[in-house]
Image (cartoon, grey):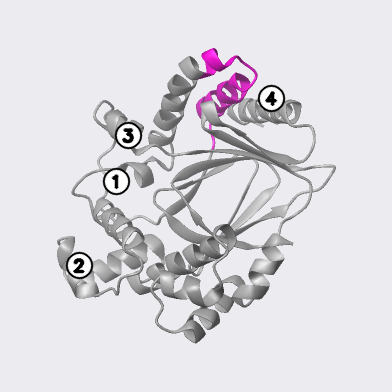
Amino acid sequence: MSEFDKSVSEKIDLLKRQLLKLMPEPTVLKIAACKLTMAHLQHPTSPRCSIYNPLALLILQGKKHSVLGSEEMEYGAGQYMVTNLDIPSTCHVSEASPEKPYLALYIELDSGIIADLLREIPLPKSTGGVHRAMAVAEAGTPLLDAFLRLTELAEKSEEEQKIMAPLVLREIHYRLLTGAAGDYIATLNTVGSKDHQILKAVEWIKNNFAEKINVENLAERFGMTASTFYRNFMKVTTLSPIQYQKQIRLNEAQRLMLAKSFDAQKAAYAVGYESATQFSAEYKRRFGLPPARDIKRLTA
C-alpha cells in the first residue's frame, strides 16, 4: 500500500468512527446547520425510484447501486458520487450487514458557492463535451479531511456550527471542483456551456411538468436545433425530454398521494395526465405496483 492509499484508508477509518460515535444505532441523521446527512444501515435496501438533487455522496463502508436510464453504477468505500442536476434514478444500498454496516454521508451542492468559486479558481479548460448527470470518483485525503471536519462540527454548539459550517462547506465544494469529477460540476454551472443549456431546460420542465412538451419549441427556447437539443439532453440525463417529464410527473403524483392523500385519478390529472388508465399503467412500470397498492405499501 502506497503512502497515499494508507492516508486515505486512515481518513476513512476516522470518518467511520466519527459516524458511529454520532449514531451508534442504524438511522439516518440530518444536521441542519451543517447541511449534512449521514446514514448508518445494517441491511441492504430495496430499489427505490427517486429524484436526486445535485449532491455529493461519500461512501465510507458498504456499497450503493444506482441506475441512471440504462446505465448502472455501483460505488463503495472511498468513492463519492456527484449529481449535477435533478435527475430521476433508481437506487438502493447493495452491501450492508450488522458486522459491516453501510456508512455514508452527503451534502447537497450549492450553485451559489460553485458560481462564486468558479470566479476565483483557474480550472483546466473544459473539453466542451456534454457530461452525464452522475459521476463516480475516488476520494482523496483533502476531501476526506474536509468531510471529517464537517462531521466533527455536529458535536459542537449551534453558534460554532453556524459560523464554521459555511467555511467547511465552501472547502468541500472547492475540493469537489478541483477533484476528478470537477468538470461535471463546473461545466453545468458555466453559462453558455452545453451542459448549462440542458440544466436550464431541465429546470423549465420541472417547473412546467404538467404542460405538454414540444421538443422543437423547447430546443428553440434554449438556443439549439431540435436534433442537437434532443441528443444533448439524452447524453446528460439518459432520457428523452418526454421521458424525463414523465418521471417527474410520476414522482410528483406519488408525493401528492402520500402527502395530500390524493387518490390516483386526482393525482393523475394534477400532474398533467389526461387518462387515469394510462397514468396507472405508467406508474406501475416505474414503481412496480399500481398507485393504490404502492401507497399502501409505503404507508404501512
Cα–Cα gap, marks 3 and 1: 14 Å
Q: Residue 14 carries which label?
A: 4
10 Å neighbourhood of mark 3: few (<14), some, or many (≥20)?
few
Cα–Cα gap, marks 4 and 3: 30 Å
Decide if residue 47 is on the left or right side of residue 169: right
Q: Do the residues labelled 2 and 4 touch (CB within 8 Å)?
A: no
Q: Give the dominant element type of the magenta stretch: helix, strand or loop.
A: helix
User: Which badge, 2 or 1, is on the more N-terminal residue?
Assistant: 1
Quarter location, residue 147: top right
Q: What residue is at 43 percent from the left and 39 percent from the top? A: 109
Q: What residue is at 79 percent from the left and 32 percent from the top? A: 24
Q: What residue is at 24 percent from the left and 43 percent from the top? A: 190
Which amino acid, mark 4?
Leu
10 Å neighbourhood of mark 1: few (<14), some, or many (≥20)?
many
Q: Do the residues labelled 1 and 4 touch (CB within 8 Å)?
A: no
Identify the residue position indicated by label 2 in the image: 219
| Nearer-the-camera pick, 63 or 21 | 21
User: Which badge, 2 or 4, is on the more N-terminal residue?
Assistant: 4
Quarter location, residue 226: bottom left
Identify the residue position indicated by label 1 in the image: 187
Q: Residue 112 carries which label?
A: 3
Cα–Cα gap, marks 1 and 4: 33 Å
Residue 288 visible, this angle: no
Residue 201 visible, this angle: yes
Q: Magenta residues? A: 139-161
Decide if residue 27 is on the left or right side of residue 115: right
10 Å neighbourhood of mark 4: few (<14), some, or many (≥20)?
some
